[in-house]
Image (spheres, grey):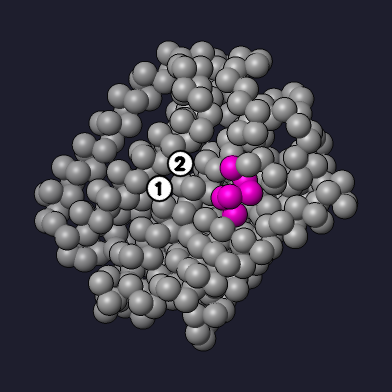
């Protein structure tokens, strides 16, 4: 386990920074009046400060910088993450306004994805750029918005991101000899996990939300790290399977919401109370219980990804098929659940965050 030593500094620095910065950002949001107020599609009960996203982003950057010299690709991801953070802050300043049009948001995210791809973020299993570039662009934009949609209850998006970050960090440093990108990937993933965990105590108590700034930053950074790292040990196809397993739940939740909304003739880009977490609450779980159950799903898929990294391709495909089957059955159950009802499971201090 000595190979995990390089992860300690970025993780601990980011964790400690987030613990300090999150209350400061809460005070700043209160002072500026940047609050997410109840009403409309919101499920929380009291005005809650936003601007948790900047705390996560700055803590993550502190962890990355504390780990040692930053290479060009890692620096590019930090810069692009900062730019997408500002896009989220723009919407968080007036969370009840329409904000930037959805197609402009996608266009800006696509531009930042290209900005990251240019210095060297490529997919190792696709050797030709004309295949690799469109796939990675779709991946980055898709995962970015998946985490934005997942941010609909206290602790949900940050907790799932922490599990994913730790998994990527362990896998990247475990196979550090696979390429020069492995160590920077491991450090950045560990820093992101630390930043998210440091943010969670305040978020779980409804003292602050991460807002669009935080969810967009987390999703964008994780998507870039998933594409940057080499997950091809022992076989090249695992470079596809491992990121899909680690980020299985955000992909599942987004897919479920989009399919069910399209079947009802609704727009998939408009916020709603029909996510998997909302449906779990309407099946009888409390909000904290729903979040913890989703953590369990994310953790089980993360452990499956760790297993896949050490077995043959045939067993990897069986593991992926098993995980997909479990989520498919889970989705078939959730689609029968009613969407959020007014007043459902209102648990006081653990009231949920805004919906994606």
Q: Position of residue 182 (x, y in %)?
A: 36, 74
The residue sitting at 22% across, 59% down in the picture is: 309
Q: Is residue 186 left or right of residue 1?
A: right
Highlighted magenta segment, given as a residue range: 199-204
Characterize the magenta stretch by its predominant secondary structure.
helix
Vertical comparison of 262 with 246: above or below: above
Vertical comparison of 21 with 173: above or below: above
What residue would you read off at disc 2? 250
Task: Pick out the residue farthest to the bottom.
Answer: 69
Q: Contact (CB < 8 A) between labels 1 and 2? A: yes
Q: Which mark is residue 59?
A: none
Q: Nearer the viewer, residue 16 or 175?
A: 16
- Under circle 1, the secondary element is loop
Q: Can residue 76 be seen here?
A: no
The residue sitting at 26% across, 38% down in the picture is: 323
Q: Nearer the viewer, residue 152 or 285?
A: 285
What residue would you read off at disc 1? 247
Q: Can residue 165 be seen here?
A: yes
Q: Is residue 259 left or right of residue 110?
A: left
The residue sitting at 75% across, 24% down in the picture is: 40
Tell me the crowding category of disc 2: few under 14, some 14 to 19, or many 20 or more residues within 10 angstroms, Cα based.
many
Q: CA distance from mark 1 to mark 2?
A: 6 Å
Q: Position of residue 312 (x, y in %)?
A: 11, 56
């Amino acid at each position: 386990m000595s190979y995990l030593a390089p992860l300690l500094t970025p993780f601990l620095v980011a964790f400690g920074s987030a613990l300090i910065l999150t209350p400061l950002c809460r005070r700043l949001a209160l002072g500026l009046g940047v609050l997410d107020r109840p009403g409309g599609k919101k499920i929380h009960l009291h005005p809650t400060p936003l601007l948790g996203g900047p705390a996560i982003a700055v803590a993550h950057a502190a962890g990355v910088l504390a780990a040692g010299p930053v290479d060009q690709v890692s620096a590019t991801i930090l810069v692009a993450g900062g730019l997408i953070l500002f896009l989220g802050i723009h919407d968080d300043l007036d969370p009840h306004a329409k904000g930037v049009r959805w197609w402009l948001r996608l266009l800006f995210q696509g531009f930042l994805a290209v900005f990251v791809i240019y210095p060297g973020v490529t997919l190792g299993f696709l050797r030709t750029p004309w295949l690799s570039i469109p796939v990675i662009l779709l991946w980055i934009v898709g995962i970015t918005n998946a985490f934005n949609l997942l941010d609909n209850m206290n602790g949900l998006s940050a907790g799932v991101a922490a599990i994913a970050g730790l998994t990527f960090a362990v896998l990247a440093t475990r196979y550090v000899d696979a390429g020069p990108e492995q160590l920077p990937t491991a450090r950045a993933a560990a820093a992101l996990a630390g930043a998210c965990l440091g943010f969670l105590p305040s978020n779980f108590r409804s003292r602050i939300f991460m807002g669009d700034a935080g969810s967009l930053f987390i999703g964008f950074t994780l998507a870039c790290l998933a594409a940057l790292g080499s997950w091809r040990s022992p076989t090249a196809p695992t470079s596809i399977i491992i990121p899909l397993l680690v980020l299985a739940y955000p992909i599942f939740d987004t897919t479920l919401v989009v399919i069910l909304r399209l079947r009802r003739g609704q727009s998939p880009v408009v916020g709603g109370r029909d996510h998997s977490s909302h449906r779990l609450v309407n099946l009888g779980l409390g909000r904290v219980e729903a979040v913890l159950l989703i953590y369990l799903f994310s953790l089980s898929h993360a452990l499956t990804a760790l297993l896949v990294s050490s077995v043959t391709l045939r067993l990897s495909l069986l593991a992926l098929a098993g995980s997909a089957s479990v989520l498919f059955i889970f989705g078939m159950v959730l689609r029968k659940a009613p969407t959020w009802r007014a007043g459902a499971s209102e648990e006081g201090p653990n009231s949920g965050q805004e919906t994606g």
